[in-house]
Image (tube, rainbow, N blue to C red):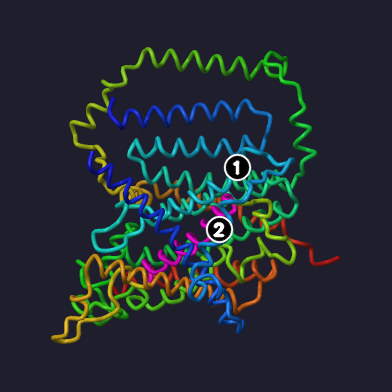
Amino acid sequence: MDFYLTYILSAIGLFSFSALFALFGVYAERKVSAFIQDRLGPTETGKFGTLQTFADILKLVQKELIIPAAADKLLFILAPGIIFVAVYLGFAALPWAPGLVPSKLNLGLYYFFAIISVETLGILMAGWGSNNKYSILGAMRSIAQIISYEIPAGFALISVVMIAQTLNLQDIATQQGILATEKIKFLGYWDVTTTGGVLSWNIFRAPHLIIAFVIYFISSLAESNRAPFDIPEAESELVSGFHTEYSGLRFGLIFLAEYSMMFLVSMVGAILFLGAWNTPLPNIGPVHLATWTTGTAWGILWIGLKSFALVGVQMWIRWTLPRLRVDQLMNLCWKVLTPLAFVCMLLSGIWRLWLM
Amino acid sequence: MTLLQILFYVMGFIAVASAIYVAATKNLVRCVFMFFITLFALAGLYVLALADFVAITQIVIYVGGILVLILFAFMLSGKENLNIIQQQGSRLMNLSTLPALVLAVLFFVLMVNMMGKIDADNLDWIKSSIQNGNVITPDANVTDNIGINLMTRYLLPFEAISILLMVALVGAAHLSRKERTA
C-alpha cells in the first residue's frame, strides 16, 4: 500500500506548491508592475510588503460567499472547482528531475493538451451560471480565444514531438542533456551528446524550434487569459469578465487557477524547448560542469529557475503591452501564428528526415 | 473485488447515472454540463480497457471541442428560446414518443438476449488471440501501434476522412464569406 501513500503525498505536495506559487506570484506581479510603472508597490505590510498577499488571503477567506439570486446555483458553485482542478491535473505528467515525475505517462504531452481544454468548460460554466451579461460576454470571449489559440500551440507542440519522436515528457526531457541515450547534434551537425548543457536543448538541436517556442509562448499567454490577450476580463468594458460575481474563497480559487496556469504553461514551455531539468552549463574539456550539475536537487532547481524566468517574462509583457482588440487578436492567431506553426511542422519533418 | 473492479463499477455507475440525467432533465445547459461528466467517466473506462490514447482523444475532441461548440450555440440563442423548451409537457406515453419507446424496448430486449447467450469469458477469438500472443500489455506503447497502422493498413480510409474534412472546411469558409459586390 506504500505507493498509494506516495501518490497522495505527491498530490498534496503539488497542491501546496501551486498555492505557495500563487502567493509568491501575486507579490512578484505587484512589485514587477510597480517597478515598470515607476511606483513602489506594496510597502506597508511586513518588510518590503512581503506579507501583503498573506493579508489579502486572510481577508479573502473571511469574506461572505455571495450567490446572486438569479444564478444557476449548482453551476455557479461548481465552476471555480472545475477551473482549478483542470489546471491542477495538468501538473500530474510534468517531470521535475531525472527519475522524479508524478506520473510516467507515455502520452504525457497529449494528456496535458487535453486536460487544459477542460478549463474552458469551467469558464463557460462560471459565465453561464452567474447569469450576468458581463460574465457571459467574458466567458464567450475567453472561449473563442482559447479555442483559436489551441491550434497554433498544438502545431508548435507537434513540431517538437516530430523532433523528439515521443510524447513522454520525461523522455523529451532526458533527450536534451548528457543523460540522453541517443546522439544529440547541435544545429544538426556538431555531436554534443557528451557535452550537454545549453547546446543540446531542443531550440538548438533544431533552430526552427525557436520560432515554434515563440509561437507556443504567445499562444500560452492567450490560453491563460493574460495580457495582451486579456479581453475576457477587460476591466474597462466588462467589469472583470467571467468572475465578476464571485467573492471570497471562490474568487480565490479562480485566482489560484490563473497563477497555477501561468506556471504550468511556462513549465511545459521549459520542458519542451529549454532543456527541461537539464543544466545550461556544458562540459568543457576536463571541466565537467554539466556532469556536476545534474541530479535530482539540481533538476528541481533548473526547471524551477527556467519556469520562473518564463513567468517573469509573462509579467513583463503584461505590464508593457496594451490589450489587443478582438479582430487584431483573431488576425494574429489565424493569419500569422497558424501558418507559421504549419511551416515549423514542415521544417521539423525535413529536419528529422535529412539532418538527424 | 480488486481495485480495478471497484474503479470499473464506480465509473460505470457515474457514466450511466449522468447519462440518465442528461436524457431526463429539462434544463438544457445543465444537461450539456452533465454530458461532460458522462464523457469523462467513459474516458476512464477506456483507460481501464488499456486504450489510453482513445481516452485522451475523447477528452480533446468531445470536451474541448464539441461540448464547447454546443454551449456556444446555447449562449448565442438567448434564454427565451431555452425556456420554451423547458415548458413543454413531459408525458412518457405519447403518440409522438411511441416509435422511440418501441425502438428502445426492442433494443433492450435484444441486448438482454445477447447478454444471456454470449459467454463473454470463453469467446473463440479472445482465446486464439491469447494463444497467439496478440494482446496489449499495460506498459505497451499504443500510440506507435496506432500511428503505424494508420499509415499502412488503414491509409485509404484515413485519407478519405481527411478529404471529407477538407471539403467541410472549404464549405464553411464559403458559407461564412461576405460577398464583395454590394
Residue identified by numbered label 2: A255
Question: Which element carries disc 2, helix, strand or loop?
Answer: helix
* Furthest-bottom residue in this view: A285
Question: Is the N terminus of chain B in the top left, top right, bottom left or bottom right quadrant?
Answer: top left
Chain letter for mark 1, please. A
- Residue at image position (71%, 16%) is B91
Residue identified by numbered label 1: A77
Instruction: Residue type at mark 1: give it.
Output: Ile
Few, some or many residues within 10 Å of mark 2 (<14, 14–19, 20+): some
> Which span of residues is magenta-colored?
A249-273
Chain letter for mark 2, please. A
- Residue at image position (35%, 16%) is B118
Q: Position of residue A235 (x, y in %)?
A: 70, 65
Question: How many labels were placed on the picture?
Answer: 2
Find residue A306 and report its image quarter.
Answer: bottom left
Few, some or many residues within 10 Å of mark 1 (<14, 14–19, 20+): some
